[in-house]
Amino acid sequence: MSKFAKKPKPLPAVSTASLPDIVFMLLFFFMVTTVLREQDLLVEQKIPQATQLQKLQNKTLISYIFIGKPKNTGLYGSEPRIQANDVLIGTPDIVQWVNQERDLLPEADRGLITISMKVDKDVKMGPVSDVQTELRNADARRVLYASSTKVPN
């Protein structure tokens, strides 16, 4: 037996020199991958209120159409316009737009495309009816009408 006992060696401290680098890499990663807003609205939107709402399950199958008066009335006039994917389109262009949106989806989900219409509450029913007719012609049968919740009195 030995007379001298071995002293336990202390564990070396964990180096924190690279910690700021890791934090900034994570910060940049989330800044690059986060999508804050998908589209810039070119039309006015005052969404009507509803008494019953249903939340959507699969938002990847939804494409949005906005109908309202243009924000830039000097350039686009004062009549209600249709916006899809950051551009103003005419009623005859809706079939082509639906087909382009369908092509972006996986092949198994193309029949499940849902069109969400966000219509300004001051827009008359004529342009909405025209859009509905064109959606039927494009075989887009699933149509949602966006609304906000009704505030209880």
Image (tube, rainbow, N blue to C red):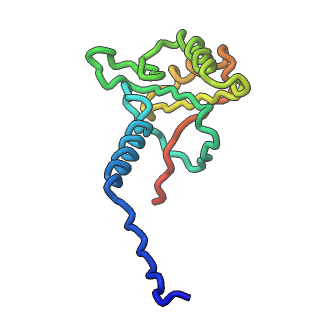
Residue at the top extreme of this rendering:
92
Give the percent coordinates (x, y) of residue 104.
60, 21
Task: Tell how many labels.
Answer: 0
Position above or below: 8 against 121: below
| Residue drawn where x is 48% and y is 22% of the image | 84
Position above or below: 109 against 131: below
Q: Nearer the viewer, residue 84 or 51?
A: 84
Give the percent coordinates (x, y) of residue 85.
46, 22
Q: Quadrant of the C terminus?
A: bottom left
Give the percent coordinates (x, y) of residue 64.
52, 29
| Residue drawn where x is 33% and y is 48% of the image | 21
| Residue drawn where x is 34% and y is 47% of the image | 24
Q: Nearer the viewer, residue 39 or 104?
A: 104
Q: Is residue 51 visible?
A: yes
Quarter of the image where one finds residue 11: bottom left
| Residue drawn where x is 35% and y is 23% of the image | 70
Q: Nearer the viewer, residue 53 or 64?
A: 64
* 150 relative position to 54: left or right: left
Give the percent coordinates (x, y) of residue 5.
47, 86
Q: Quadrant of the N terminus?
A: bottom right
Q: Is residue 46 visible?
A: no
Residue at the left extreme of this rendering:
74
Position above or below: 92 against 33: above
Quarter of the image where one finds residue 46: top left
